[in-house]
Amino acid sequence: MQTTTTKHTIGGIDLPSSGPDSVLNPAAFVQTVVHHEIKELGQHVLACIVSYRIPSTIANTFPVPPENPADPTMRTMRKFYKFMVTNPLSVKTKVQITKSPHASLLAHEREKVFLEVHIQNLTQKPMAFHRIRFECLDGWRAQDINAGVYDQDGGRTMPAGEVRQYLYVLTPTTVMQEGGRKVISAPTPGSTIGLGRLDISWTTAFGEPGRLLTSVS
């Protein structure tokens, strides 16, 4: 498998050079299954290379010439399959803090951070989600308030093009530091602070697994 930046050998079959198992009879075949985790977007090329030997009696008349004239019975066949990898999901996040004048009077409400997550299926087929989870960093406690929203009527499956919204409520926690305790304050408007990461896993309509880990700040 080759991309614009990497090249990996993802599988192969090595047959013995002699004996009955070294000969592929007419209409016979060999096969293998390979697995490869795709981590890059863009153009991919799957190269399939088969090296084989022909009887020396037909080496001079065989329609495919040898690559190495010093080894006239060795032949090589190559097939290349190109495909494009695009984003299967669009994930957008928005961080909000409490703006209500009444909430600003209460410390436990004033320090809350609301994380909105918008997920869209960009593929042409439905996908089944196995996990949509937010893992907060130390110093934060996350409340998942999405339980039951998409659980009914096969909510694990998202049709092509559909957009869903998830909401998490984050509260700063008390952490130990030298000299005593310190409470992590909620971020001020316009500031940037790490909150955690989203862990999303799914399966496509063809059974292909996928996983996305993305940081949130």
Image (cartoon, rainbow, N blue to C red):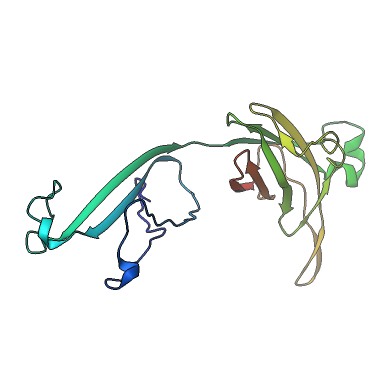
* Residue 23 against residue 165 in the figure, above or below: below
Q: What residue appears at the point 9 percent right and 50 percent down from the top-left corner?
A: 61
In the rendered view, does 155 fall on the left or right side of 92?
right
- Give the quadrant of the C terminus: top right
Q: What residue appears at the point 30 percent right and 73 percent down from the top-left corner?
A: 19
Can you give x and y, in whole percent of width and height, for residue 56 in the image?
12, 62
In the rendered view, does 67 fall on the left or right side of 41?
left
In the rendered view, does 170 fall on the left or right side of 210?
right
Q: What residue appears at the point 12 percent right and 55 percent down from the top-left corner?
A: 58
Q: Total of numbered circles in the picture?
A: 0
Residue 199 appears in the rendering: yes
Residue 116 appears in the rendering: no
- Of residues 42 and 105, which is closer to you in this image? 42
Can you give x and y, in whole percent of width and height, for residue 28 in the image?
37, 54
- Of residues 67 and 62, which is closer to you in this image? 62
Tell me the quarter of the picture where residue 175 sits: bottom right
Extreme residue toward the front, this view: 26
Q: What residue appears at the point 22 percent right and 54 percent down from the top-left corner?
A: 76
Can you give x and y, in whole percent of width and height, for residue 23 in the image?
30, 63
Can you give x and y, in whole percent of width and height, for residue 92 in the image?
64, 35
